[in-house]
């Protein structure tokens, strides 16, 4: 888990923790990049791994448009 967190930058306190975001991707995934952006008015975490790209809404409850 330490290696996975190393690629993430600090995010504001009102956003989910890095650990809670990473729980939504397979644990064996090697995270290459993680960023946060706005897509269609929704805050999105974009996680790029060695084999895939995951996009999750910041509250994990809104459907991704």
Image: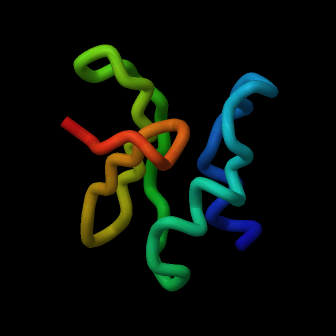
Q: Is residue 49 above or below residue 18?
A: below
Residue drawn at (51%, 37%), measured in percent from left and top?
A: 58
Judging depth in this view, the residue of 13 and 50 nearest the camera is 13
- Residue 54 horizontal side relative to residue 30, left or right: left
Q: Outermost residue, top direction?
A: 41
- Residue 51 horizontal side relative to residue 13, left or right: left
Residue drawn at (49%, 48%), measured in percent from left and top?
A: 60
Residue drawn at (44%, 56%), measured in percent from left and top?
A: 32
Q: Outermost residue, right direction?
A: 13
- Residue 22 horizontal side relative to residue 44, left or right: right
Among the 4 quarters of the image, the one containing residue 21: bottom right
- Residue 34 horizontal side relative to residue 62, left or right: right
Expressed as whole percent of the image width and height from the top left, the position of residue 9 reads 66, 35
Q: Is residue 33 above or below residue 32?
A: above
Considering the image in quadrants, where does the N terminus appear? Answer: bottom right
Q: Is residue 54 above or below residue 26?
A: above
Expressed as whole percent of the image width and height from the top left, the position of residue 35 reads 47, 35
Considering the image in quadrants, where does the C terminus appear? Answer: top left
Among the 4 quarters of the image, the one containing residue 4: bottom right
Among the 4 quarters of the image, the one containing residue 8: top right
Residue drawn at (47%, 71%), measured in percent from left and top?
A: 30
Judging depth in this view, the residue of 35 and 45 nearest the camera is 45
């Amino acid at each position: 888990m330490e290696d996975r967190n190393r690629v993430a930058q600090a995010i504001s306190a009102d956003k989910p923790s890095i650990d809670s975001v990473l729980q939504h991707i397979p644990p064996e995934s090697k995270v290459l990049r993680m960023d946060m952006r706005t897509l269609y008015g929704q805050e999105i975490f974009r996680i790029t791994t060695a084999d895939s790209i995951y996009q999750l809404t910041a509250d994990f409850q809104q459907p991704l448009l």
